[in-house]
Amino acid sequence: MQGWFHLGGTAMVPAATPMFSVLLVDDDEKILDIFSRFLESKGCRVRVATGGHEAVQAAREHPVDLVMMDVRMPDMDGLAAFRQIRQAAPAVPIVLMTGYSAREDLQQLIQAGEVEYLHKPVTLDQLAKLVDRLASERRT
C-alpha cells in the first residue's frame, strides 16, 4: 500500500501522519538498540533512557506519543517511574515490559486500565502491532 510504513508482520503506520514518537526505557542497551533501530527504520522518532530517573526527566522535557519501559531497573523501577511520568503526562500511553511475573501492584494497574503490559521477550512483531494500534488511536 502506497503511503504506509510497514512495521513488520501485518502492522502498518500511515506515512502521512506526523511522526509517532516513542520513549524506550530499559537498562539493557541491546534491547534499546534493537527496538530503536527497528522503530526508526519505520518512521518513528525514538528517544532512549537507561533508567527510571532518566525516563522521568525525558518524559517531562520531551513529550512523546508512547512510553515503553522495563519494570526492573537498578536506579528506579518502572512502576515508580510510571507514577511520576503519569503525573507529568497523564494522557500518554505507557507500556511496561518485564520478563518476570507481574507483581500485585502491576496487576492492579493493568486491571484498572492504567497501563499496558508486555511479557519479555517482546518480539518486533508485537512492537509493530502495538505502535500501529496506538498511532491509529492517536489519529482518531
Image (cartoon, grey):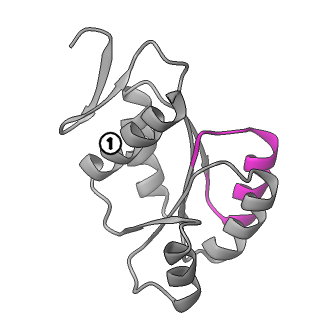
**Quadrant of residue 128 in the image?**
top left
Q: Is residue 77 visible?
A: no
- The image shows residue 113 at horizontal and vertical percentages of 53, 67
Split into 4 quadrants, where in the image is the N terminus? top left
Callout 1 amino acid: Ala
The stretch drawn in magenta includes residue 113? no
- The image shows residue 120 at horizontal and vertical percentages of 35, 69
Q: Is residue 112 above or below residue 69?
A: below
Bounds of the magenta span? 49-66
**Quadrant of residue 81 in the image?**
bottom right
Q: Is residue 60 above or below residue 114?
A: above
- The image shows residue 78 at horizontal and vertical percentages of 62, 71
Q: Is residue 22 above or below residue 68?
A: above
Q: Is residue 101 visible?
A: yes
At a point 44% along the width and 47% down the height, the residue shown is 33
Which residue carries the number 1 mark?
Answer: 128
Front-lying residue, 20 or 37: 20
Taking the image as shown, residue 138 lies to the left or right of residue 3, namely right
At a point 55% along the width and 19% down the height, the residue shown is 18
